Amino acid sequence: MPSDTPILSLENLSKTFAVRPVFGRASAVNALRNVSLDLLPGRALALVGESGSGKSTFGKMIVGVHAPTSGRILFEGNDISGMTAKADQKRYRQAVQMVFQDPFSSLNPAHTIRHHLLRALALHQPEADPDTALQAILKDVELDPASTPGKFPHELSGGQRQRVNFARALAVKARMIVADEPTSMLDVSIRKSVLGLMQRLKSEHGLSILYITHDIATAEYLAEDTAVMFRGQVVEKGPTSQVVGNPQHGYTKLLRAAGPNPEVRLTGSDAGFAAQAKLVREASTQVVSALCEINPGHFIAEHTEMAHV
Amino acid sequence: MSPLLSVKDLRIDYLTAGEPFTAVRDISFEIQPNEILGLAGESGCGKSTVAYALMRLHKPPALVRNGHILFEGRDVLSFGDKELRAWRWSEVSMVFQSAMNSLSPVMTIFRQFYDMLRAHGTVSKAQAQERIAQMLEMVGIPSDRMHAHPHQLSGGMRQRVALALALTLKPKLIIMDEPTTALDVVVQREILQEVLRLKDELGFSVLFITHDIALMAQISDRIGIMREGKIVEIGTTSQIVTAPKRDYTRSLWDAMPLLAQRPEGMAHAV
Ligand SMILES: Nc1ncnc2c1ncn2[C@@H]1O[C@H](COP(=O)(O)OP(=O)(O)OP(=O)(O)O)[C@@H](O)[C@H]1O
Ligand SMILES: Nc1ncnc2c1ncn2[C@@H]1O[C@H](COP(=O)(O)OP(=O)(O)OP(=O)(O)O)[C@@H](O)[C@H]1O
Ligand SMILES: [Mg+2]
Ligand SMILES: [Mg+2]
C-alpha cells in the first residue's frame, strides 16, 4: 500500500457479542475476528462481504457505538480509547461521521431540513453566518437551496434525504465518513447520483470514506481500495482494480460470479450453486493464519487446515 | 384457469394539504396461481402503494378511490375486520421494503413468529420452536438466533427473518417489496432459489417488486412496468426483455449498470 500515513488504522480488532436468551445458556457471536485495515486520507476503502460478516459492526466501532473486545483504533496515530480529554473526544466525534442505509431513520421527522443543518452548523461552525453556510452546503450536495430548508424529511425522496445526511457531515466539517450501505435502498438512477456526490466529496473536499456495501460494481466506481469480509475476517484486500478485477480468494470469486445475469433464469432445482457456495463457505470460515501478498498491496488470506471430523 | 388475484381499475390517492395526489391511476392486472409477477418502475411510481393496498394495509392519508381487488373471486376491499385478520398472513403475506417495518424492535424473533403462528391455529411452544428453527435455517440464519432481538441481527439477517416470516404460514400469495436489497449476491441467489424451490413444491404466487431489473428478469414469469401510477406495459419476461413495446421500458434496460467483465466460470472458485 502507498506510504501515506493512514487517517485511521484498525489493528487486530475483535468483537464478541454475548446473546442471552430468556432461558438457557448465553452464547457468543464472534462478529469480528482479529481484523486489521488502514484507511488513507482522501481515499475511499470499500468494505464488501457476506451478510452478517461484521461490516456494520466495524463501522459502529469506528464511530464509538461499540467498544472493541480487543485491538486498537488509531486516528492519525492516536489510540481513540486513550482520548480522555473532552476536547480530543469532541474533535474525533466531529471528524468521523456516519451515514446509514435507511435514509428514513436518520432524520427526525418532526424537524425541517433547516433545523437539522443549522443545529450542526451552530455546534461546529459557530463563526460562520448560518444562512450563508446553509445555502453553500445545500448547493454542495446538489439540493435546491431555496425550497429544501423549509421541508420536512418525509417530503423528500430517499435520494434527497441521503444528500441531507451528507450535508450534515459537511456542516460539522467531517474529515472522514463511514457510509453503511448508503445507496442500497435507492433505485439505479438515484444511486448513481449519490455515488457521484460521494466521489466529489472525496476529490474536492479531501474526505476519506469507508464505504460499506454489498454492491461490488459501485465499489469499483468509488473506492481505490477494497477489503472483502467473510464471517468476521478479512479474506482479501488491496487495490479495487485487482480485488474486483482479478479476485484470488475463493469467496471473492464466488461473490463476483453470483451477480444477477438477466440471461440466466433462476430455478429451484439448481443445486449446483448452493453446493458450490457451501464448499467455499466451509473453507473460508477457517481461521486466517496469514495474509499473503500476491501482488504489491494485494493480499489474500491463507486459512488453517480444515479440522477433520 | 381463474386468476388468484385480480385487480381492476385501482386508483389510490394520498390526501395532502392541497389537492389530493393520485399515486395509482386506474391500474388493472392479474396474478395466476403459481406465477411470479414482477413489478418494476422508477422510485416514486407507486409500487409500494399498490403493495400495501393489496394487503389492505393502506392507511390514511392513502385512500382507495376506485376499483376492485379480488382474491380467489372474493372482494378484498369489502372484508370485515375478522375476515381480514384470518386472511392476512395465512393466505397473503408481505415482505416490506424496509425490514424494520416487518419486525417489532421490542420482541425477540421467536416471539414474533410464535405470535403469528398462534394467531392462525393452535401450536405448542415446542412445535413452534421446531418450525421457527426450520424457517431460520432455510434463510441461512443459525436457529439459536431466534432468541435475539432485531437490533442484535445484521441488516441482511433482519431482511431474511422478514422473508422467513412471510413464508411460514404457506400463503397462496406473497408480496415481496424489494426483499433482497440488504443482501450480498451470493445469499440473495441462494435464498431466491430456495423461494423458487418452495414455490414448485407448494404452488404459491409472488408479486416481486424490485428496482434491480436484471434480478427481476431472472425470477419473474411476467413483468409489469409502472410509470407515474400507471402500468405502461405488461407481458411475459422474454417479451419485456427482448422485445419491449415502449421506449420507456427500453430506457430502463439501457440504464441498467452493466457488470464489468465477468470473471470466467466458477470452476476454480475454491
Ligand atoms: N448488538 C448486537 N448484539 C449481538 N449480536 C450482534 C449485535 N450487533 C451485531 N451482532 C452480530 O454480529 C454479526 C455481524 O453483524 P453486522 O451487522 O456487523 O454484519 P454486516 O456485515 O453488516 O451484515 P449485513 O450485510 O447483513 O448488514 C451478526 O451475526 C450479528 O447478528
Ligand atoms: N404518506 C404519503 N403522503 C403523500 N404522498 C405519498 C405518501 N406516501 C407516498 N407518497 C407518494 O406516492 C408516490 C408513490 O410512492 P410509493 O412509495 O408507492 O413509490 P415506489 O414506487 O414504491 O417508490 P420506491 O421505489 O422509491 O420505493 C410517490 O410520489 C410518493 O411521494
Ligand atoms: Mg450491515
Ligand atoms: Mg417502494
Image: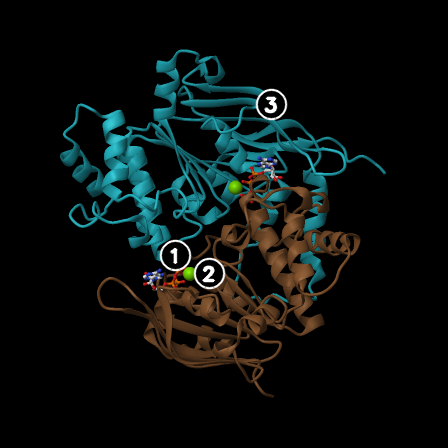
Chain colours: A cyan, B brown
Q: Quadrant of ligand 4?
A: bottom left
* Contact? badges 1 and 2 (CB < 8 Å): yes
Mark 1 vs mark 2, CA separation in Å: 8 Å
Is A260 above or below relative to B78?
above
Q: Which residue is mark 3?
A: A69
* Contact? badges 1 and 3 (CB < 8 Å): no
Look at the numbered disc 3 and give the secondary structure of its residue: loop
Taking the image as shown, residue A229 lies to the left or right of residue A302, namely left
Q: Nearer the viewer, mark 1 or mark 3?
A: 3
Q: Position of residue B69 (x, y in %)?
A: 48, 79
Q: Residue at x 43, y 64 (%)?
A: B48
Mark 3 vs mark 2, CA separation in Å: 38 Å
| Crowding at mark 2 (Cα within 10 Å: few <14, some 14-19, many 20+) | some
Q: Which residue is mark 1?
A: A188
Q: Nearer the viewer, mark 3 or mark 2?
A: 3
Q: Which residue is mark 2?
A: B212
Q: Residue at x 15, y 36 (%)?
A: A131
Look at the image and tell me in which quarter the N terminus of chain B lies.
bottom right
Residue type at numbered disc 1 = Val
